[in-house]
Amino acid sequence: MKKGILSLLAIILIVGLLAACGPDDEPAETGSENETGSDAATTETDKPEKLIVWEDQDKGAALEDAAAKFTEEYGIEIEYVEYNITEIQENLALDGNTENAPDVVTMSHDGVGPSVVKGYISPLEVSDEVLSQYTQSSVDAFEYEGQLYGLPKATETTVFIYNKDLLPEVPATMDEVFELSKEAHDGENYGFLGLWDDFYHSHGIFHGFGSYVFGDEPTDIGLNNEQGVEALEYMDTWYEEGLFPRGIIGETSNDQMNGLFKEGKAFAVQNGPWAFKDYQDAGINIGIAPMPSLPNGEPIGTYMGVKGWFVTNFSDNKDWAQTFVEFITNEENATKRYELTGEIPPLVSLLENEEWVAENEGAAAVMEQSKVAVAMPSIPEMAEVWDPIKQAVQTVATDKAEAKEALDQSVELMIQNIQMNHGGN
């Protein structure tokens, strides 16, 4: 009798389960594992009323245009605050766990490493279609230990800026520039000038000769290898010939160089887009081009800085925050931002647009140079490189040491400081 009752209950249970799973029923819709950005946000995350964005100082006007479009399309308000971009990390430390915490921030790429270590920013999963909009070097700048953390907003690197009234055509090689500089130098006038004791400006020479900053680990520094010595000896020839005046070294070097160029006493300089307007305002008929190649035929691999947009770990709406990051960096919004701020977007489509290149000589030169540029390392250990290498170049330029000796001492100091301050091995 008991067995019969149990059998009857079992049959009823089975019938009930079959009815619940009828042929017309479909599983609940969920977000695909491959969805990223806007797709993931719209299917997986409740829509917030607003996103808080930290923008660079005096750049809010450019953000407003894209924010209005975003609000219209997605119904999410964008509230932004302007900060000096160099203070973003400091402010994240102060406001990260408060109601003022941002969902999205802008930073330079050299802040990626420290921000990841401190837990400020979140990794991104972005489709190849989105990434293909940008130059590869600009995307690489936002990777840290194999993970992508941001999307590019603007790129900058040093280029060859020349006075068209003094130098009608851009030489193809630095050998030609050297010879023309010797002809131009008469004690008062100069040819090409560069701030090569500043490693941001001289890295391209070291890189082009085959030297390197960091190898497989932070204490693997190749600036004093055979190629590094050759690079510094090459730079020293400019100082030995007097082609760089003594004032183009040390703290006042930037003012000295800019002064000579703006006075028409130098036909070219190596400098970045931040200097374009200053030179034009001084009445110089400037031309702008990528850097000429080195004597060994290699390009000058200048250091590149890239600004980008990042999703913070403080955000409760990371999917929507990434949607905004993808939106604000797309071709339409990035191009509009360039028109409003002059910040140069590393967009492949613009470089391939001949009309745009012709109308935007400076931006096109920066973007072209960026193809061979090297993103400045974003690891914290980079802080230990600047002063020692500056001292090495200055020591050689002032005839106080040979290149090999100066570079050996410089690299030894870098390694010591890395081991002491960063736990390097």
Image: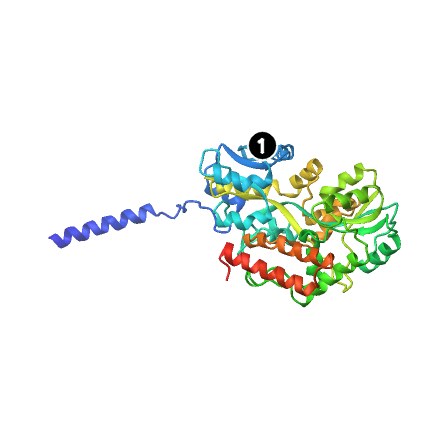
Identified at 58% across, 35% down, the residue is: 83
- Position in image of residue 82 (x %, y %): 58, 34
- Choose between 254 and 139: the one closer to the eye: 254
- Position in image of residue 304 (x %, y %): 66, 51
- Choose between 265 and 9: the one closer to the eye: 265
Q: Is residue 304 above or below residue 280?
A: below
Q: Which residue is mark 1?
A: 72
Q: Is residue 205 left or right of residue 280?
A: left
Which image quadrant for residue 165?
A: top right
- Position in image of residue 242 (x %, y %): 81, 55
Identify the amino acid type marked 1: Glu
Identified at 56% across, 63% down, the residue is: 216
Q: Is residue 77 above or below residue 383?
A: above
Secondary-structure class at tag 1? helix
- Choose between 254 and 284: the one closer to the eye: 254
Residue 198 visible here: yes
